[in-house]
Image (spheres, rainbow, N blue to C red):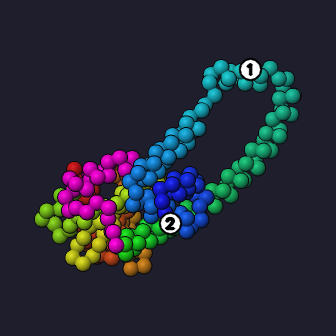
Amino acid sequence: MVCKDCSEKLDAYFDGELSAEDARSVAEHLRQCPSCAADALSKVEMKRAVHAAGQKYAPNPEFRAHLQKQIASQKPGTRARNWMPIFAVAAVALVLIAAISVFVVHRSKGASQQLWSELVDQHVSTLASSNMVDVVSSDRHTVKPWFEGKIPFTFNLPELQGSPFVLIGGRVDYLKQSPGAELIFGIRQHRISVFIFRDADLPEGGERQAVQTDLSFQVRRWRQNGLTYFMISDASPQDLDQLSNLIKSAK
């Protein structure tokens, strides 16, 4: 894919309107092209700002007072008759809310599983790629600054000297069209993917820390300083626990 094609498809990509094949093609191009990645980041920030602005409106005091005056001016009988349809609508709304709540609970469980599946797929895809990372370095002071301007947040990396782990490098990745960091660590013959995204960019909440197994992979999840960390590997649970503790204490 060339940059012109990618640029024309970015809006559709972030709106989820592309086919699965086109979406994968755009995502792959964004990982390899810093210019398009920066353009994509700008679009994400603009969409987020527009969405936030749309949630800020509230009736001003004058408008509220005007409504209260209109209600108070109605005759008691008329007011009661006017409120009857509203009560009926409210009753229907309560039933709908209860039904939607049950649906959301079941859907959130499926969404959580889908989230893990996407991350596991990305972990496997990264390890299978001939260019596993975009910044290749074991120096945290090289890897961390590389992400500046590519993702809308920063994070700390641990000092690994004296530990069995080695930092291999990192790359920009996307989850639900939101940019984040994917870091690759090594321990013996195993590779560990650590994904970092902003809490606000994720489609669902989650426990402070979650531990589960997906197929043959061990996974970890925790939140810290407004960020959510996902860790995936076929390394042992003890290895993942040790690395997660190092990352949590990084300064």
| Picture coordinates of residue 161, whole percent (x, y) | 13, 62
Horizontally, residue 79 falls left or right of residue 208, namely: right
> Residue sitting at 80 percent across and 20 percent down?
73
One can see residue 106 in this view: no
Q: Nearer the viewer, residue 158 or 39?
A: 39
Q: Disc 1 marks which amino acid?
A: Lys
Task: Choose top left, top right, bottom left or bottom right for residue 166.
Answer: bottom left
Mark 2 or mark 1, which is nearer the start of the sequence?
2
Which numbered dot is residue 24? 2
Q: Of the residues shown, which amino acid type is indicated by label 2? A: Arg
User: What residue range appears in magenta?
Assistant: 130-156
Of 49 and 60, nearer the camera is 49
* Above or below, comparing residue 93 to residue 2 in the picture: above
Q: Residue at x 71, y 49 (%)?
A: 94
Task: Count the marks.
Answer: 2
Q: Nearer the viewer, residue 168 or 198?
A: 168
Which disc is residue 69 wearing? 1
Q: Do we see residue 42 in this rendering?
A: yes
Q: What SS does tag 1 mark?
A: helix
**Which quadrant of the structure image shows residue 221?**
bottom left
Is residue 131 part of the magenta span, yes or no?
Answer: yes
